[in-house]
């Protein structure tokens, strides 16, 4: 009697172990608006036909996704949210869920019953977890133009849209030839009530070295080892600012002042020279006055030897004048 009880308990434990092993949950990933797979992995060691089986899947809320009763689909038992979205692969015992949405994330179970004379007997059960992902767009950098545009402070935003699940971090990386810096900011996020997808962005301000080329990246960190980078945003080194050109009117004024100063100096120099050296014309006038008073004086002046070259010239002129006057008197 004890032996029969021991055998019965042993068989019960083996059946429970098989059910638990069959019910082990598998993780399956699917992308938003694409197709996810819900495996059942039925070994079918007895080579049973579909006509002998009842197969169905249900979600974590006990809503039926698909039912196959003795080889025939039973859409009347399917929840409206899943109608037209499933297909059964008989070769792999897998149910495919099409047009996957974020709200489809969760646990699913498949059940297989064998129809016998005494009724339906559960022969296989399996659970799987469906994880729905949505790829974020490549982060985009946009420069903010404001009052600090001409300084060495740069203001920019970085954004990425239509992704799931929520990312862990978003930051900006600034790279030069000799250094690299990271700038964090509070990540702003919004989630659609319909698609449940996330839009995220950050706004940062930081100084950039004007004397070297700079490359900026925006990074979106989804997981510790999964990061999406933006296209590089390049800023060239600033050229030295040239001195502003001198206005034309200032050049003209400066030239005029120089001309006036030079002219004034030349005029003063000539004037000083005239005061030091009296001209011969004054001496000639004095001699002419004396010639009118007396012809004898004029003759003596003619016979006298001049002491300077200027007096010689004047004496010659006076002599000619006196001779002409004398000839006129004789006539």
Image (cartoon, rainbow, N blue to C red):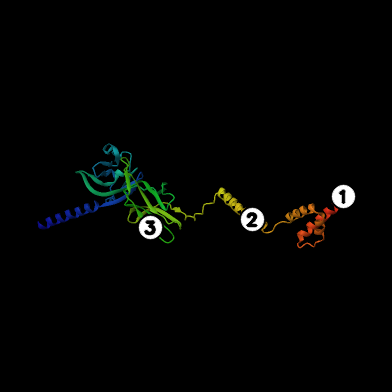
The residue under label 3 is: 181
Kindly report the distance in space between the C-alpha atoms of the residues bearing marks 2 and 3. 69 Å
The residue under label 1 is: 329
Left or right, residue 35 beside residue 300: left
For label 3, the SS is strand
Tell me residue 6's x, y (percent).
13, 57
Tell me residue 226's x, y (percent).
35, 54
Residue at horizontal 81 percent and vertical 59 percent from the top? 300
For label 2, the SS is helix
Rendered-image quadrant of the N terminus: bottom left
Residue 1 vs 56, above or below: the answer is below
Q: Residue furthest left?
A: 1
1 or 3: mark nearer the eye:
1
| Label 1, residues with CA under 10 Å away: few <14, some 14-19, many ≥20 | few
Tell me residue 187's x, y (percent).
33, 49
Residue 67 visible in rendering: no
The residue under label 2 is: 266
Circles 1 and 3: CB distance less than 8 Å? no
Kindly report the distance in space between the C-alpha atoms of the residues bearing marks 1 and 3. 119 Å
Q: Nearer the viewer, residue 329 or 177?
A: 329
Kindly report the distance in space between the C-alpha atoms of the residues bearing marks 2 and 1. 51 Å
Res 119 quadrant in image? top left
Left or right, residue 231 beside residue 259: left
Residue 17 visible in rendering: yes
């Amino acid at each position: 009697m004890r032996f029969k009880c021991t055998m019965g308990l042993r068989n019960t434990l083996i059946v429970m172990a098989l059910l638990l092993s069959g019910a082990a949950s598998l993780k399956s990933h699917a992308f938003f608006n694409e197709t996810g797979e819900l495996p059942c992995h039925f070994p079918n060691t007895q080579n049973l036909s579909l006509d002998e089986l009842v197969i169905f899947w249900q979600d974590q809320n006990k809503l039926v996704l698909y039912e196959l009763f003795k080889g025939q689909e039973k859409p009347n038992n399917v929840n409206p949210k899943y109608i037209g979205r499933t297909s059964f692969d008989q070769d792999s015992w897998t149910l495919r869920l099409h047009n996957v949405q974020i709200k489809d994330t969760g646990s699913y179970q498949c059940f297989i019953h064998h129809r016998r004379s005494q009724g339906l007997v559960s022969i296989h059960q399996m659970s799987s977890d469906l994880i729905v992902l949505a790829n974020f767009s490549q982060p985009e950098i946009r420069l903010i133009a404001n009052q600090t545009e001409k300084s060495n402070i740069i203001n920019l935003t970085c954004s990425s849209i239509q992704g799931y699940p929520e990312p862990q971090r978003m930051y900006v990386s600034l790279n030069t030839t000799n250094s690299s810096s990271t700038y964090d900011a509070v990540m702003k996020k919004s989630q659609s009530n319909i698609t449940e997808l996330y839009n995220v962005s950050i706004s940062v301000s930081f100084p950039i070295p004007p004397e070297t080329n700079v490359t900026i990246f925006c990074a979106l960190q989804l997981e510790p080892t999964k990061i999406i980078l933006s296209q590089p945003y390049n800023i060239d080194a600033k050229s030295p600012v040239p001195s502003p050109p001198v206005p034309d009117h200032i050049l003209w004024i400066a030239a005029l002042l120089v001309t006036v100063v030079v002219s004034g100096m030349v005029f003063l120099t000539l004037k000083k020279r005239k005061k030091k050296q009296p001209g011969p014309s004054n001496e000639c006038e004095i001699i002419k006055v004396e010639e009118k008073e007396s012809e004898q004086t004029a003759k003596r002046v003619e016979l006298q030897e001049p002491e300077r070259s200027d007096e010689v010239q004047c004496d010659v002129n006076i002599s000619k004048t006196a001779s002409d006057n004398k000839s006129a008197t004789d006539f």
